[in-house]
Image: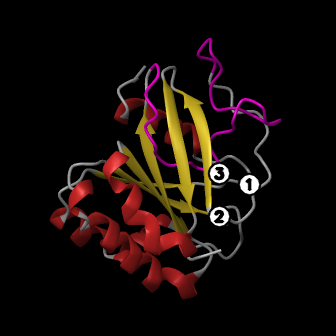
Amino acid sequence: MGPSRAVACGSCTGGQTASGCGCLYLAYPPACQGPQLSTEDGNTELGAPPATLPTVGTNLSDLRLPRRARLRELGGCMGPIWPSYYGECSAVLFVVDAANPTQVSSSCVQLLSVLSAAPLAAVPVLVLFNKIDLPCYMSLAEMKSLFRMQDIVSCATQSITMLETSARDGTGLADVLQWLRATLGDAR
């Protein structure tokens, strides 16, 4: 897997087919077995965390917030084609491996590339520092310092939020769901 992953979110209603991002850790197509972030009745129990695998190519998932949102996950190795999805994004989730210090610089370069893309100038961004369940992870304070997030946030045209997560044990996923709901207009 690449050092980071961009997840572009598109919200859609009715017959629209807005392409967006997928988040391997957050959403499942209805036919899959596994926990769901939200049921149709609005229950937000996350259930057991899913098994995780590196993203190869792209993955699509639908998520109910309660309105349907289409999520497209793009692996880090797919960076060269990320721009082809920017025009359809309503939000971006940028996932960074917080347990891999050797990839911090390339993840930062990828993040800066995403933030400087003209089609994303007004699209809200959620930066997720993932794998905080591992003993060698870097804390949020360390990651903010290494990425120089204060400088990035002050210069960016987008709203940027940062969270720590663990796809494996579910830490932070409820906060991600809350951010998605608020960002895509379904705040509760």
Question: How packed is label 1: few (under 14 Cα within 10 Å), some, or many (20 or more)?
Answer: some
Of mark 1 and mark 2, the one earlier in the sequence is: 2
Q: Is 34 contained in the magenta span?
A: yes
Of circles 2 and 3, the one toward us is 3
Residue at (37, 46) in percent of width and height: 91
Of circles 3 and 1, the one toward us is 3
**Corner quadrant of residue 148:** bottom left
* Mark 2–mark 3 distance (CA, rounded to whole Å): 13 Å
**Percent position (x, y) of residue 179?**
43, 38
Q: Is residue 1 above or below residue 172?
A: below
Q: Which mark is residue 131?
A: 2
**Percent position (x, y) of residue 92?**
40, 52
Question: How packed is label 2: few (under 14 Cα within 10 Å), some, or many (20 or more)?
Answer: many
Which SS class for mark 2? loop
Residue at (67, 66) in percent of width and height: 56
Task: Report the number of discs.
Answer: 3
Q: Give the residue at mark 3.
A: 24
Q: Say which amino acid is labelled 3.
A: Leu
* Mark 1–mark 2 distance (CA, rounded to whole Å): 7 Å
Which SS class for mark 1? loop
Q: Give the residue at mark 1.
A: 168
Q: Quadrant of the C terminus?
A: top left
- For this rendering, which residue is in front, 40 or 16? 16
**Percent position (x, y) of residue 176?**
51, 42
Q: Say which amino acid is labelled 1.
A: Arg
The magenta segment: 14-43
- For this rendering, which residue is in front, 11 or 3? 11
Q: Quadrant of the N terminus?
A: bottom right
